[in-house]
Image (cartoon, rainbow, N blue to C red):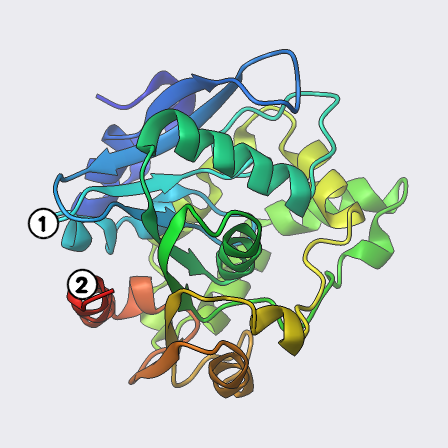
C-alpha cells in the first residue's frame, strides 16, 4: 500500500525499486524553531548497523531520487533519505522563509529527533551544496561527507530573475511542464533511454503537493546557495568522497577537480559512462564506492 499523500499518480509507477521505495515513505511531525506548528516531514529508513547514511536529494526532487541507490546501501547500513524543507512531500507551511538557512535548520532537527548519532552525509547535485552547508554548520553531526556531482561552486539560480509577479508563477509552471522535465532529464543522463515514464513520474509526483509553487518561488527568491569560496571549503575537516559522472552535461566536469583541490581530506572518483546522476544511471558502481568509503578507517 502507498501512503495516502502520494496521490493517485503513484499507481502508474512500474519499476520495482520505485514502487518499493514509494511504499516505504514514512512521515514524522517534526518540531523545529521555524514555526509553532510541527512540520510533517517525509523520509525513508531502511537497514540497520554501521554508521548511519543520510541521503540528500537535489533541486525540485524527493526521496524517490534514491530509489535505485538506497536499497544497495541499506543491506549492511542503516540508511535514511529525507525530503528537505520546501521539497518532495514534506509539508510546505505558510509563514516559513524557504531558504538554505531554514533547510539546514529543518535537517538538523530531523537528525536530532530521529537519527541522533553522527552520519555519513551524502548529497547529490543541489543536495551536495546542502550537505556542504550543513557540514560546515554542524560539523559534530557529520562523520564523513560524500558529494555526487555537487552544486556549490556556482551560486544562485537562473530562475531568480523571473521571480516577480506574474512571472514567478509562470516560471514555476514552466518547471511543472512534463515536456520541459523530460528534456532536462534527458540532459541529466548520458544514456537518455533511461528517461522512462517511470522515471518522469518519480520526478513529478511531488509537484501536486499543496503550496509546491509558493515554496519554489520563495526558495528561488532567497537566492538559493551562494558559491562556496575556497577558503570556506577548506574548513571541511571530514574525509570527503567526491563522485562525478564523466559526462555530466548539467554542471560539467570542471568543478570536480576544484572541489578536490579546495576540500583538504578529499578524494575524487570518476564514474565512467555516466551523466549528472550516477546514483540513478550507475547505482551499483556508485553504491560500491560509497560502501568502500564507509568502511575505511575514520
The residue under the point 43% across, 57% down is 123
* Helix, strand or loop for disc 1: loop
Q: Residue at x 15, y 48 (%)?
A: 50
Describe residue 149's horizontal placement relative to residue 174 as left or right.
left
The answer to whether mark 1 and mark 2 are in CB contact below 8 A is: yes
Q: Determine whether the residue tagged by mark 2 lies in a helix, strand or loop.
A: helix
Badge 1: residue crowd in 10 Å (few <14, some 14–19, many ≥20): some
From the image, which quarter does the N terminus lie in?
top left
The disc placed on residue 76 is 1
Residue 117 appears left or right of 16:
right
What is the number of callouts on the image? 2
Residue 108 is situated, as x and y percent measured from the top left of the image, at 49, 36
Q: Nearer the viewer, residue 208 or 37?
A: 37
Q: Residue at point 58% right, 71% down?
A: 233
Q: Place residue 217 in its image quadrant.
A: top right
Task: Point out the tag, 1 or 2, that comes first from the N-terminus.
Answer: 1
Viewer-side residue, 263 vs 167: 263
Instruction: Residue 168: name its quadrant.
Output: top right
* Residue at far right of view: 165
- The quarter of the picture where the C terminus appears is bottom left
Residue 15 in view in this figure: no
What is the spatial separation of the Cα atoms under label 1 and label 2, in whole angstroms? Answer: 9 Å
151 left or right, relative to 72: right
At a point 19% along the width and 67% down the height, the residue shown is 297
Q: Which residue is mark 2?
A: 291
How dense is the environment of label 2, judged by Cα within 10 Å: few (below 14), some, or many (20 and up)? Answer: some
Answer above or below: position of 237 versus 23. Answer: below
Q: Is residue 170 visible?
A: yes
Question: Compared to 255, does 146 lie above or below?
Answer: above
Q: Which residue is at the front of the view, 185 or 146? A: 146
Check residue 59 in the rendering and tell me which mark sits there, or answer none. Answer: none
Residue 11, position in %: x, y?
30, 30
Amino acid at each position: 500500500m502507498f501512503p495516502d499523500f502520494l496521490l493517485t499518480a503513484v499507481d502508474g509507477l512500474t519499476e520495482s525499486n520505485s514502487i518499493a521505495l514509494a511504499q516505504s515513505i514514512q512521515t514524522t511531525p517534526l518540531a523545529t524553531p521555524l514555526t509553532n506548528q510541527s512540520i510533517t516531514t517525509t523520509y525513508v529508513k531502511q537497514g540497520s548497523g554501521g554508521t548511519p547514511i543520510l541521503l540528500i536529494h537535489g533541486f525540485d526532487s524527493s526521496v524517490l531520487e534514491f530509489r535505485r541507490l538506497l536499497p544497495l546501501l541499506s543491506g549492511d547500513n542503516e540508511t535514511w533519505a529525507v525530503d528537505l524543507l520546501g521539497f518532495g512531500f514534506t509539508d510546505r507551511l505558510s509563514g516559513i522563509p524557504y531558504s538554505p538557512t531554514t533547510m539546514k535548520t529543518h535537517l538538523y532537527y530531523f537528525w536530532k529527533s530521529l537519527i541522533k548519532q553522527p552520519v555519513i552525509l551524502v548529497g547529490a547535485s543541489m543536495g551536495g551544496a546542502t550537505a556542504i552547508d550543513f557540514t560546515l554548520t554542524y560539523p559534530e553531526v557529520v562523520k564523513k561527507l560524500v558529494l555526487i556531482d555537487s552544486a556549490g561552486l556556482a551560486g544562485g539560480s537562473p530562475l531568480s530573475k523571473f521571480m516577480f509577479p506574474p512571472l514567478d508563477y509562470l516560471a514555476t509552471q514552466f518547471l511543472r511542464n512534463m515536456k520541459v522535465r523530460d528534456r532536462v532529464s534527458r540532459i541529466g543522463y548520458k544514456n537518455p533511454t533511461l528517461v522512462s515514464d517511470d522515471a518522469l513520474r518519480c520526478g513529478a509526483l511531488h509537484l501536486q503537493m499543496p503550496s509546491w509553487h509558493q515554496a519554489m518561488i520563495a526558495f528561488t527568491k532567497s537566492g538559493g546557495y551562494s558559491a562556496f569560496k575556497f577558503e570556506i571549503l577548506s574548513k571541511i575537516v571530514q574525509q570527503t568522497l567526491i563522485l562525478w559522472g564523466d559526462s555530466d552535461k548539467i554542471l560539467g566536469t570542471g568543478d570536480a577537480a576544484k572541489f578536490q583541490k579546495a576540500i583538504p581530506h578529499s578524494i575524487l572518483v570518476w564514474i565512467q559512462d555516466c551523466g549528472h546522476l550516477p546514483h540513478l544511471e550507475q547505482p551499483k558502481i556508485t553504491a560500491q564506492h560509497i560502501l568502500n568509503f564507509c568502511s575505511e578507517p575514520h
